Amino acid sequence: MINASTFEKLKALNCSAMADEFQNQLNDSKSYNVLGFEERLGLLVDAEWNRRQANKLKNLIKRAAFSVSAACVEDIEYLPDRKLDKAQMIRFSPCQYINEGHHIILKGATGSGKT
């Protein structure tokens, strides 16, 4: 009874990931009973934190209105006619150049894949 009340209160507090993790811990008590209170609470908080960060990133990507919102560095096609240096692209991917105050200028013919 108290577990159901706790679950509902977590949902009411908009902590749905924490509520889901709490439900998982209740359903798989063999695995979680070996953990101490602090560890189990940490798992609950981590689940909520991770979901909120993922939702935040998803919303930021959506609001940015990228032409290809699912684009990622790993999907770049390094065809010979594009003349892209893979090592250089990987170096640029963590965006450290922004913190260093540098800029990147992409130039090329129309339709060459600068986007």
Image: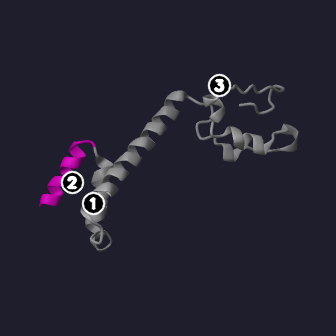
Disc 1: which residue: 23
CA distance separating discs 1 and 3: 47 Å
**Does the segment drawn in magenta span residue 23?**
no
Q: Residues within 10 Å of mark 2 (few under 14, many from 20)?
A: some
On residue 7, which mark appears? 2
* Residue type indicated by callout 1: Gln
**Which is more N-terminal, label 2 or label 1?**
2
Q: Quadrant of the C terminus?
A: top right
Residue 29 falls in image quadrant: bottom left
CA distance separating discs 1 and 2: 7 Å
Q: Residue 20, image x and y in percent?
A: 31, 55
Q: Residue furthest right?
A: 81
Residue drawn where x is 60% and y is 30% of the image? 99
Q: Secondary structure at mark 2?
A: helix
Q: Residues within 10 Å of mark 1 (few under 14, many from 20)?
A: some
Q: How is the image coloured?
A: one colour
Residue drawn where x is 30% and y is 48% of the image? 16
* Residue type indicated by callout 3: Gly
Please identify, in this view, whether the residue under mark 1 or under mark 3 is nearer the observer.
3
Please identify, in this view, whether the residue under mark 3 or under mark 2 is nearer the observer.
3
CA distance separating discs 3 and 2: 48 Å
Q: Secondary structure at mark 3?
A: loop
Disc 3: which residue: 101
- Marks 3/2 in contact by CB < 8 Å: the verdict is no
Between residue 22 and residue 68, name the one nearer to us: 22
Give the number of callouts. 3
**Does the segment drawn in magenta span residue 2?**
yes
- Highlighted magenta segment, given as a residue range: 1-14
